[in-house]
Amino acid sequence: MRLVAEGVERARQDRPEQWERSNVARLKMKTPETFDGKSSTAFNQWWEAVTMYLGFYPETDGRQKIAWVGTLLADSALVWHLHRFRELGENDTWANYSAAIGAEYRNEREAADAQLKLGQLKYQGSIRAYLVEFRALNNFARATGEALREKWT
């Protein structure tokens, strides 16, 4: 028994960072929803969820990220991904892939749509719910100054 204890203590001293990690419960993050590439699907919000997810797992390399994002795609977005993979294969990089998918699907009208919804937002009995919705919409609308003042008057 003493020999086992000494062996464990030596392992802790040799690689303390690995030993500490193995004793910590691994948190899991919910996988983002599927993105289908349709104009009605909010790409910007989806991409933020993907970025946060990947930030939670920083040890993932670029090729793994590209393959994993492909598993979250459906319909025309999956067709886009597979076409890109056939053309670039292992030569693709995460920086190039993330720039390309953003250029392909980023909704330039998202800010304008959020601004419109912000103007239509109504208080419905809960100030907390109203403020949460207001902040969420304004995150994309980026209303400041006069545009924001118009909403409050």
Image (cartoon, rainbow, N blue to C red):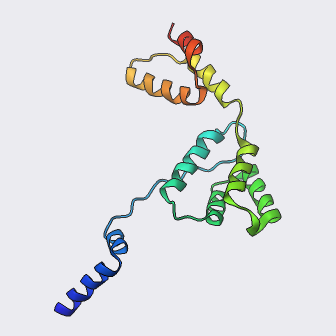
User: Which quarter of the image is occupied by the N terminus?
Assistant: bottom left
Q: Nearer the viewer, residue 2 or 81?
A: 2
Q: Residue furthest front?
A: 14
- Furthest-right residue in this view: 87
Question: Percent x, y for residue 19?
Answer: 33, 74
> Would residue 101 be found to the left or right of residue 83 on screen?
left
Residue 145 horizontal side relative to residue 75, left or right: left
| Visible residue check, residue 120 | no
The residue at 31%/83% (across/down) is 11
User: Which image quadrant for residue 21?
Assistant: bottom left
Could you tell me which residue is drawn at 74 percent across and 57 percent down?
A: 81
* Res. 143 in view: yes
Tally the numbered discs. Answer: 0
| Residue at the top extreme, as displayed | 153
Left or right of 81: which side holds 111? left
Q: Residue at x 62, y 50 (%)?
A: 34
The answer to which quarter of the image holds residue 38 is: top right
**Residue 128: horizontal and vertical position, in percent?**
38, 24
The vertical placement of 109 against 80, above or below, is above
Q: Would you place residue 88 above or below residue 53 in this image?
A: below
Q: Give the x, y percent position of residue 20.
A: 32, 70
What residue is drawn where x is 70% and y is 29%? 109
Left or right of residue 52, residue 40 in this image: right
Above or below, 69 relative to 23 = above
In the depicted structure, whether residue 105 falls above or below residue 137: below
Which is more toward the observer, 26 or 31? Answer: 26
